[in-house]
Image (cartoon, rainbow, N blue to C red):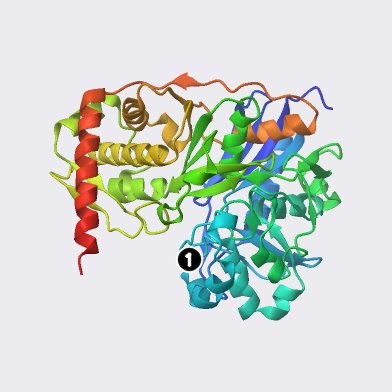
Amino acid sequence: MDTSRPAAVAVFDVGKSNVRLSVVNDAGVAMTTLERQNRVDSSPPYPHFDADELYEWLIGGLATLARDFDVHSIVPVTHGACAALADDDGLALPIMDYEFRGVNGVDSDYDAIARDFARTASPKLPAGLNLGRQLFWQQQQFLREFSRATITPYPQYWAARMCGVRAWEPTSLGCHTDLWEPQRGDFSSFAKTMGWDSRFGRRVSAWTPLGAPLPEVAERTGLSNECKVLAGIHDSNASYLAHRATRDDPFCVVSTGTWIVMMAHGSPLEILREELDMLANVDAFGSPVPTARFMGGREYAAICGDDAGVMQPSVSDLETILASDALAIPSFADQGGPFRAQVGRIVGDAPDAPRNRATLAAMYCALMTDYCLTMLEARGDIILEGRLASNDAFVAALAALREPQPVFRSPDETGTLRGAVSLSLLARGKRPEPARLDRCPLASIARLRSARLRWQRLLLTTRREESRP
C-alpha cells in the first residue's frame, strides 16, 4: 500500500438520475466526488444507457482520483430493475432503461407465467420495473442475441467491466424482478421455467472481491494490482446495509433519491400488499426485508417545478405552508407507490414562490413517507438517507408525524457511501462501525397531524370520485 496517499474506497454509484464516483475513507466520509447526469439514449433498438460512454467517464474519473488516493477497493452501486446481457465480446444488447413502456406489449403472455406475488413478493409494475418483463421482451424480440448472453445484474456488470469476472448476488434479484423467491432464497419457478437460472454465472456475496482491475484498466487509471473490485450491490440495499451490519433491533431505513424506498427490519412479511406496491427486498445477507416505496424524487420535482434542485426549504418555511390551506394529493408519478393510478392535484391556494413550492413538495413527501411507514408497521428508529435527508422541511415534518418514534438522518449525502464502505470492510474481514446519525428537528406536531387528517380525508374523497363509473 502506498502510504504517501490516503487509502480510499472508490464507490461508483449509478443512480437513475445521477452518476457519482467518490473516494471514501473507512469512516464513510467522501473525500472527493465526481458527478454527472445519467443520460438515456433514445435511439434504437429501445431507450438504453450508453454503457461505453459511461465506462469512459468512469475510467477518466478513476485516473484522476488515483493520482491523489491509494484506491484499494472499487465498489459498484446501482439502481435496480436493470441487467446487462453480455458475452465474451461485450454487450449482446444495449442495457435497457426501465421506463421503456414498449415491454408492456408482452403483458398477457408474461403475466400468465410470471405473476406469483405470494412467492416472489414482486408486485406487478408498469414499463420495465419488473426486470423479468424486460428479459421476457428481449428474448422474444432478439432471440439470437439473447441466447448467447450471460444475464448480469447491473452492479455486477460494472464489476465485470473493471475486472473481467461475471457474477451475481441477490440484492438486485430481490427487488421486484419476478425472478427470485425471497423466503426460499432461490430463483422463482418463472425464472427456472425460462431457463434463466442457469444464465447468471456464479453466485457471490456483495462484498466478494472478484479480482484485480484488468490490465488495460490498470494501465489507463494507474490503479494498483492490489486493488480489488467487489461484486457490488443494489443502491437502496447499500443504504440499508450501512445500518443492518451493526443493528439487530427493529429499525427502518428511508432511502431518498429518484425513489423513496423504506426497508423495515423487524416487520412481518405477511403485511405486504401487492396493490399498494409493497414488496420484499433482499438484503446483502440474503434475508427478505419488507419494503414500501414511491417515486418521491420524481414527484418532488413535479410539484416543485424547475427549482426542485435549488431550494432547500426550512422548518420556518414549513410553518408558512402549514398556515395556508395548500396540500398536494397523490400521485404525481405513475410508476410506483400505493396511489400510482391516481392523478395528482394541489388543493387550496397553490403557492407561487419557488421556496414555497419546494416546501409543499417536501411536506407531500413527508406525508407519503409517513403513510408508507404505517403500512409497513415500521418499529424502532427511522433513519433517513440520501438527497432529502438534508431537506429540513421534509425531515422536520416527518419527525413530527412519527413522534414519539425517533427519526434520525445520516450525513451521507447519497445514502449509499457508508453501505459501500461496509462491503469493503467485510471483504477485509473487519466489522463496520455504527453510522453517525443526527436527531431530526421537529416541526409543530399538532399542525402536522391536523394536516395529515385533512390530507387523508381528501385522499379518501379522491378514491371515491375515481371509482365512480
Q: Is residue 467 left or right of residue 43?
A: left
Residue at image position (45%, 64%) is 126
- On-image quarter of the C terminus: bottom left
Mark 1 nearby-residue class (10 Å; few <14, some 14–19, many ≥20): many
Residue nearer the viewer, 341 or 139: 341
Residue nearer the viewer, 402 or 353: 402
Q: Can residue 31 be seen in the rendering of this structure?
A: no
The residue carrying mark 1 is: 127
Q: Can residue 450 be seen in the rendering of this structure?
A: yes
- On-image quarter of the N terminus: top right
Q: Is residue 349 left or right of residue 245?
A: left
- Residue 313: % across, % down: 30, 32
Q: Quadrant of residue 179?
A: bottom right
Q: Quadrant of residue 454?
A: top left
- Residue 369: % across, % down: 38, 39
- Residue 254: % across, % down: 47, 36
Q: How many marks?
A: 1
Residue at image position (60%, 58%) is 82
> What amino acid type is highlighted by mark number 1?
Ala
- Residue 164: % across, % down: 81, 54
Mark 1, secondary structure of its residue: loop
Seen in the picture, residue 67 relative to 329 is either above or below; the reply is above
Seen in the picture, residue 58 relative to 138 is either above or below; the reply is above
Residue at image position (59%, 58%) is 177
Residue at image position (51%, 69%) is 42
